[in-house]
């Protein structure tokens, strides 16, 4: 009688049991698809910045779009919004969700740096541009801290607090943009000037958007400024305070102009096409701030915008300014510097955070 053959179970190869996701720039998405999604994001999110970005050479323009897409998506996730607006049919997110949303941003950004897919095109885009240009996790964290300040309802008390806010939400972005344009991470002087330009842009935005921010229960005017003007908390948009509000807006624009003038010293070191694009953006955002100041107490009766014809004039002026490339020496450098702000950040310590609920495994 034949003996039955004994069948010995064979172990599967490890690759058959657990497949690791290979690290790839952009999480495996095609560069063309990521660039197109990024172009759509900037076109919807910032018409002024989109206009200026068209002046870059193609490679730089695409990289600027990729970085912008990440910034826009992080901002939306932090605030529970869609391109700066609450999703239709959904109430604004409350602070109780902030910890979870911020943790998601950090986890997705970390995966992007590792070249792992995130299921979020904007984060995959960031992973791609970070790999191409040498952006660092520290640079990204500086920007994420700005989203954190907004998500947690943080408000500035002092000038130093305002400087810290402007650095995280815009100055740190300026530093990353400069690296995307080819400025080496070791060129601290040029990166300082790029930070100045980001801060200038943010100061212009704050001055223009005081009424809109108040409607969203936000205020970026330092509490000490309001106290100096004898304005009660939450009452700065009352009609009888319009004179004082105009004075504070003019103060913001004064700071903006110092940073704007200092930034031009760094812009002079960029290649011509990048110089032209950055100067066009500087002229457009500067014009917004100066128009707010010129309108005085009427600045918030209707939103300050820069029309197409005026933008075209700024683009033409920026061309000749970039061609000449002899920025005047500023009368005075800004009071707020990247170095001093970062020292203040370290001394102030971490931002107070709400408890963070654990993310589900599938997130």
Image: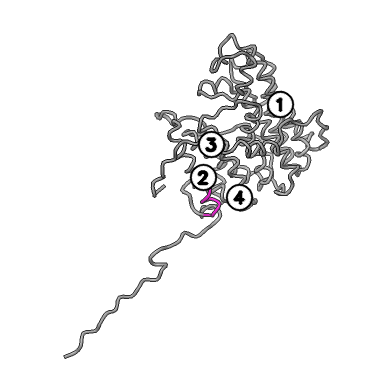
How far apart are the two marked residues, 4 and 1, measured between alpha carbons? 31 Å
The residue stretch that appears in magenta: 109-115
User: Which of the two discs, 2 and 4, labels the residue nearer the N terminus?
Assistant: 2
Which residue is disc 3 drawn over?
A: 148
Q: Residue at x 43, y 35 (%)?
A: 97
* Callout 2 secondary element: helix
* Callout 4 secondary element: helix
Q: Are marks 4 and 1 in contact (CB under 8 Å)?
A: no
Q: Crowding near pointer 1: few (<14 within 10 Å), some, many (20+)?
A: some
* Callout 1 secondary element: helix
Which residue is disc 4 drawn over?
A: 130
Left/right placement of residue 234 relative to residue 60 reads left
User: Which of the two discs, 3 and 1, labels the residue nearer the N terminus?
Assistant: 3
Q: Residue furthest top?
A: 240
Which residue is disc 2 drawn over?
A: 106
Q: Is residue 57 magenta?
A: no
User: Which of the two discs, 4 and 1, labels the residue nearer the N terminus?
Assistant: 4
User: Which of the two discs, 3 and 4, labels the residue nearer the N terminus?
Assistant: 4
How far apart are the two marked residues, 3 and 4, measured between alpha carbons? 21 Å
């Amino acid at each position: 009688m034949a003996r039955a053959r004994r069948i010995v179970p064979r172990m599967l190869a490890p690759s058959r049991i657990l497949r690791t996701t290979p690290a790839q720039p952009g999480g495996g998405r095609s560069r063309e698809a990521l660039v197109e999604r990024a172009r759509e994001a900037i076109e919807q999110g910032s018409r002024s910045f989109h206009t200026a970005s068209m002046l870059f050479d193609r490679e730089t323009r695409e990289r600027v779009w990729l970085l912008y897409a990440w910034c826009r998506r992080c901002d939306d996730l932090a605030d529970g919004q869609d391109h700066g607006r609450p999703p239709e049919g959904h109430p604004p997110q409350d602070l109780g969700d902030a910890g979870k949303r911020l943790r998601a941003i950090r986890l997705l950004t970390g995966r992007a740096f590792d070249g792992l897919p995130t299921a979020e095109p904007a984060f995959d885009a960031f992973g791609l541009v970070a790999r191409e240009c040498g952006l660092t996790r520290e640079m990204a964290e500086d920007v994420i801290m700005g989203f954190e300040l907004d998500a947690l309802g943080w408000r500035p008390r002092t000038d130093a607090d305002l400087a810290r806010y402007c650095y995280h939400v815009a100055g740190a972005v300026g530093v990353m943009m400069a690296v995307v344009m080819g400025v080496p991470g070791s060129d601290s002087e040029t990166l300082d000037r790029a930070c100045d330009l980001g801060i200038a842009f943010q100061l212009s935005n704050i001055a223009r958007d005081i009424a809109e921010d108040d409607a969203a229960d936000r205020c970026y005017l330092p509490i000490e400024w309001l106290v100096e003007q004898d304005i009660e908390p939450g009452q700065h948009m009352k009609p009888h305070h319009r004179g004082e509000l105009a004075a504070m807006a003019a103060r913001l624009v004064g700071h903006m102009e110092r940073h704007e003038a200092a930034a031009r010293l760094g812009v002079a070191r960029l290649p011509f096409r990048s110089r032209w694009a950055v100067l066009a953006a500087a002229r457009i955002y500067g014009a917004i701030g100066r128009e707010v100041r010129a309108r005085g107490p009427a600045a918030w009766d209707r939103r300050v915008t820069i029309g197409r014809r005026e933008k075209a004039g700024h683009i033409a002026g920026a061309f000749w300014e970039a061609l000449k490339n002899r920025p005047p020496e500023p009368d005075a450098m800004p009071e707020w510097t990247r170095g001093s702000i970062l020292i203040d950040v370290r001394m102030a310590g971490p931002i107070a955070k709400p408890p963070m609920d654990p993310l589900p495994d599938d997130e």
